[in-house]
Amino acid sequence: MAAFVLDADDAALEADPGRPARRQDLSGDDQRAFREQGPALMTYRELARMSLVEPLEDMFPILKVLLEKTGAWEACIQAFLDARVVRSPHYRDIAPSFLGWLAETRWGQDRWPFLLELAHAEILEVLVARYPDEESPAGLHAEPGPGDLVVLAGPTQVVSYGHAVHRSRVDSPVPEARPTHLLAFRDPEGDARLMDLTPATAALLRQAQDQPLGAAAEALGFTDLDPVLDLLRGLRRDGAIAGFLPFP
Amino acid sequence: MTQDRFTGVGLGLRRPHLDEVARREEHGVPFWETCPENVVGDGGRQHRLACAILDRDPVLTHGLAMSVGGFDPWDDEYLHGLGAFLLRTGTPWHSEHLCFTSVDASHLHELLPLPFTREAARHTIARARDLQARLPVPLLLENITYYAELGAAEMDEADFITAVLEGADVGWLLDVNNVYVNALNFGFDPKAWLDRMPLDRVAQIHIAGHKRFGDLTVDTHGAEVIDPVIELMQWTLQRLGRPVPVLLERDNHIPDLDRLLAERMRLQEAYDAALAPSGVRHA
């Protein structure tokens, strides 16, 4: 049934709806039942494909426009369906499954080097908004100090792209090639927010998760730690940072 | 199996309405139905709203993706989360569809019909019993719409459903719209069909809208319920002679909350009329 609803070659199935049953070595009676119910079985094909494709159309509208302009959207979707990578019972996971498949296969990225970044940017806010609720780690404090590690909140992502994909729009889907750094986080009300970061701030937020804040800042050329600490206090109030831990 | 606080006509809790439902405690809906797949493991503002409503109001749970008739092993991590969620909501039962939804661990997110064969019935009975043993509340199975028979049938749909419900010894979530749609597509009398069924197992009823596409009628959950389906609900309630909860499903072209509440009220009036001692009996 998976082959019937997901495989390519619509026309061949329409002409020979018994083919999937034959390939599965089902009995002659079963094969006949498939042949005799071709149009109804094609309905399942349409419904199941719609179930899997609609969330992609909803979540990746810019990517869809970009690929449709060159007639590549259908091929992309079919390659994704062929891979059978939707492994989650959660409908909300279909779009992230597509993103994971793009990352793994690098589909289309020879032609569009920004494709994966664009797809990621399109669902970044949703990924952050729907990140599973969880308790913060124990022992965090609210006031940052030079000897502390930064602990990001669970949903927070520090993202660096080679293209300004967060500026892409349906009417201008091709992004400018420009290094872009973003902080995506969930505010205290639970809504997703995006913030542009400088390269140094993005690096600091990454490095200060593993080494003392003061040392990380110094290595990155921050000569005055006070503005850095102010920024981190603000990010904690806004929900991007869960808190701070003394470096062990 | 029906519990006193679950009577009347409830609504499926949907994301577009979460803000408003959370604000309006006096919404008049006796209970909500929620799909655990849409709540378990989720997070953020919408999730918090859903949880606040589910903690405040009576809730029934209805699963979409367990693939009861399939061959894939259970997702133990999901089952663990599901069990905790069912206990948190206080639902008196959990319903799943009598179908399969995944093949070779690939989720199709569509309700696919089981072959009406003795082997498929045996397999599904064993799976349903196993699933029941892993859930903290009784399991109900729901009859689905189907548009084709998968392979050569050894029995008809009514016998297949009866065999599974009785073999697995589980309750029945009777979807009267699905019965009506199947009756249209396969040309049978829905009341005669229901007369053959184990109505003593009905613990809950679903009702919804459908749409005709050419020769085929599809269970879209995207339109208002039509009068013949409401009449079938009333006929069924009278046959049952007890106030099992009815749930109005709306998943597509979801109207604003006030319009949905008005449709719920229309169904509630039909429900009350069917169960009133002097209610009109339908032939």
Image: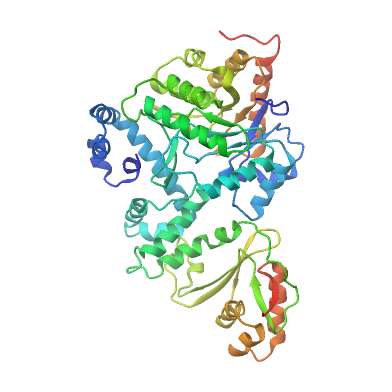
Check the image and report above or below for B169 versus A132: above
Check the image and report above or below for A194 versus B54: below
Residue B141, percent across and down?
A: 53, 30
Q: In this orientation, does residue B222 appear?
A: no
Residue B207, percent across and down?
A: 56, 27
Check the image and report above or below for A80 versus A198: above
**In-front residue for pair B278/B162:** B162
Judging from the image, the colouring scheme is rainbow
Q: In the picture provided, is A208 more to the left or to the right than B216?
A: right
Q: In the picture provided, is B87 more to the left or to the right than A171?
A: right
**In-front residue for pair B122/B190:** B122
Residue B99, percent across and down?
A: 45, 33
What number of labels is visible?
0
Dividing the picture into quadrants, the one containing residue B15 is top right
Q: In this orientation, does residue A99 appear?
A: yes
Residue at image location 59% in from the left, 13% down from the top? B239
Image quadrant where one finds the N terminus of chain A: top left
**In-front residue for pair B77/B268:** B77
Image quadrant where one finds the C terminus of chain A: bottom right
Q: In the picture provided, is B203 more to the left or to the right than A105?
A: right
Residue at image location 61% in from the left, 30% down from the top? B247
Q: In the picture provided, is B24 more to the left or to the right than A100?
A: right
Dividing the picture into quadrants, the one containing residue B7 is top right
Residue B138, percent across and down?
A: 61, 32
Residue at image location 45% in from the left, 20% down from the top? B158
**In-front residue for pair B103/A72:** B103
